[in-house]
Image (spheres, rainbow, N blue to C red):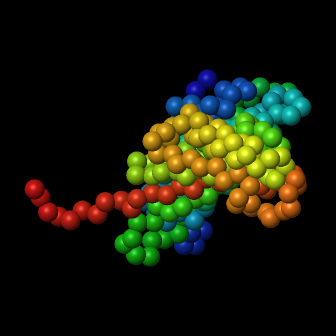
Amino acid sequence: MILPIALATVTAGAARAHQWTGYFEARHSDLSTQGFRAAREAADYCRLNRCRRVIIDAHADTLETSRPGFREDLERGRAMMLELVRQGVSPSLISIRRRGSFQLARAAGPRADEPLNRRVTVVVDTLPSQDGAPHYARIDHSTMPRVFFPPGDAEVPKDWRFTLQLLAAQWRPGCWVTLRGGADTSGSTAANQRLSERRAEGVGRLLVQYGVPWSDLRLTGSGERMLSRATADEVAEPLNRVVAADMRCNPPAVATGKHS
């Protein structure tokens, strides 16, 4: 069932909030054509105005929330956030609120399959433009997410993969990512050096899977040499089992007005 995107505008003094809503199939979190359109229109609005914050309210129907451990609302909110970031909205402006089935668009009883309740709503708060400068935030500086690992393991935990998807969504031509792997002091220095390198490689492979060219990755392993938290030898410190990512981008080319 295909439902239209809802758009509403609320005015309160100088600040304004614009709202877009996209809907989902039952137990699915992939954006529909209408969901992609909602993300694009919200991002385009940010491009033309001063964005103060972007709030994603993520909902589910009562049939979905009746199942233990349901995550449909969270995954829908994350799918919308990723698309907004791909469209150029700074992730620092975006927050996701899990609503579950607490704010139903259409009243329904328990275990009700209701399309109108399977939705995400994107609310963009703006401020009036004060000057002629562009206000749309894009990545032109370093951003440094961190991914943490279990003891002795180099496989990226599932809970950290969304962090890497967000990082990859911010990549643009002219950007590159440095990945520095680390390890705690448990085990030998040589083994920890290899482990730190494997952790950086594992993060790098996922970033490539998410769309970052391998040629734009810089991988290094620091082993025990650059600890996030200083410890004695043979200490299992979670903060040191890490890969730190640093994305940097060249500034956009400035037109000179000259013609060859």
Which of the pair 35/2 is nearer the observer? 35
Q: Is residue 175 above or below residue 105?
A: below
Q: Residue furthest top?
A: 1
Which of the pair 110/166 is nearer the observer? 166
Which of the pair 27/113 is nearer the observer? 27
| Image location of residue 215, percent across then percent down | 45, 42
Q: Residue at x 52, y 31 (%)?
A: 33
| Image location of residue 217, percent across then percent down | 51, 46
Task: Count the labels in the image.
Answer: 0
| Left/right of residue 127 with respect to residue 151 in the rendered view | left
Q: Is residue 9 above or below residue 191?
A: below
To which quarter of the image does residue 70 belong? top right
Residue 100 visible in the snapshot: no
Image quadrant holding the C terminus, namely bottom left
Q: Is residue 160 above or below residue 10?
A: above
| Image location of residue 13, percent across then percent down | 58, 72
